[in-house]
Amino acid sequence: MRRLDFRVIRVNELQLKLARLSTQGKRIIVPDGDRNESRLNARMRSSVPSRRSLSRELCWLVCYSLTLCTFGSNISAFHAAKPRQGRMNLDDNNTAPNTPRPGRLKRYLFRGLLVLLVLVAAAAVLGACYQFFENHADARRFPQKGKSVSLGPAFGNLTLNLDCDGEGSPTVILDSGLGVPAVGWNHVQAETAKFTRVCSYDRAGYGWSGVTTAPRTSAQIVKELHALLEAAHEKGPFILVGHSFGGYDVRVYNGQYPAEVAGMVLVDASHEDQLQRMPPGFQEFMKKSTESLKRQKLLAPLLIAFGVARFSERKLQASPGVSQEFGEEMRYLQLQTKFVDSTAGEMSSFPESADEVRASGNLGNKPLIVLTAGKNVDASELPPGLERKDMEDFRAIWVNELQVKLAQLSTQGKRIIVPDSDHMIPFERPDAIVSAIREVSAAANAPGR
């Protein structure tokens, strides 16, 4: 029987008979009763979860977990909020309101996460713009000093920046300490150029030089320096000047090309035995510093690209003897990914470079002056993690033993203590370096040599 036929029978006969069961019976037709029934059936059908609703619930769980990790205990504020009056429970006649619907909490969590993501994205965009415009302004303020020279196919067409001034012989070659671009020699170079030819250069990854995948050992650096001088047609013999780690390089250069070296100046230079002679606390500090530099190497591209590194260093005080403008130029050259990669590579290769220096031999009777920093580092200037006693113990070894041994590399060796300068003699006492270069140059040009 069709549904329509049954409904006619039900309304006109069966329901009418029910009303006649009582002499006081009365039948009333509810015109929209079927519609309410359909709505109830639809609601019952909707209680069965669909694939779409399951996906929505899974998405909500992910957002909820992320928001918990982000906001932590602040989520409890949602649970402590006063619930809104809900529907009455159909199973009893209690008038107490139900708990808040889950959909409202979901919306709060989703909106919170969305706001967080928008803020992070906005900060990233602003940081990238800040880095771009500031870096562009610095590039115009600080143009390249020197010229880029290609080393040819043997070195993967690596280009190094070479800056030469003055006339005279022998030519002076300046090699910087670890983490210092060639502009760190500005004061020394300007004064030296008044009496002889002098050249400074940026090692691979520094300043305006290109990058290379070759290891950052002293032996490799020396090969690149030798190729640079040949490609630029700079003629020896040379007086080599090395500050700190640069002392390793100039000594290895003398070992590889002794005929091209007329004399040497070592400026508070590193010694091949210094790692073994450090107190245990100092060795642990150096180990942690190397590990930290490796982590910085991984994070550097992001920190630099989004302006974090530049913003964090905007108020750092310049080193003693350094003008504000020069400090900003140094910062511009150091806030580059290639620079961080190269310095990290040189630091990681320090033990291997020490072995190369140890095998390079001595200088024979070539004129040599060793400049040693005489000023103690103030306790307030010590880096975090380095104890004052460890620093003082190592300094005694550095001044009284290691620097003395450097002066003994030549029968014409001489050690001079610079009392009013710390390790950064090129910044604080460039005149002391210029005087040493003048003395070594005069000895190299003396009759009979």
Image (cartoon, rainbow, N blue to C red):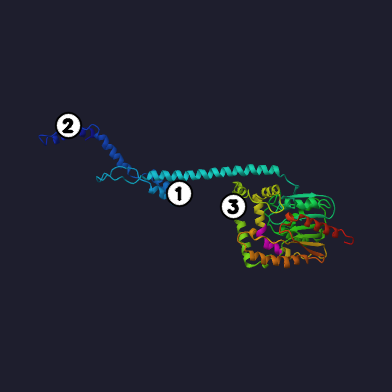
Q: Position of residue 303 (x, y in %)?
A: 59, 49
Name the residue that disc number 1 marks.
67
Q: What span is in magenta?
A: 346-355
Q: In the figure, is residue 104 to the left or right of 96? A: right
* Secondary structure type for disc 3: helix
Q: Amino acid at mark 2?
A: Asn
Q: Is residue 265 above or below residue 337?
A: below
Viewer can see residue 273: no
Identify the residue under disc 2.
Answer: 12
The residue sitting at 45% across, 43% down in the picture is 111
Observer-side mark, 1 or 2, equals 1
- Residue 306's x, y, as percent? 59, 46
Q: Main secondary structure of the magenta part?
A: helix
The x and y percentages for residue 347 are 66, 59
In this view, the residue in front, 229 or 170, is 170
Residue at the image point whose x is 69% and y is 51% from the top: 206
Cα separation between marks 1 and 2: 61 Å
Q: Earlier in the sequence, mark 1 or mark 2?
A: 2
Please name the amino acid that badge 1 sits on: Thr
Residue at the disc numbered 3: 299
SS for callout 1: helix
Question: Which amino acid lies under the numbered mark 3 shown in the image of this protein?
Answer: Leu
Considering depth in this image, is 235 or 13 the residue closer to the camera?
235
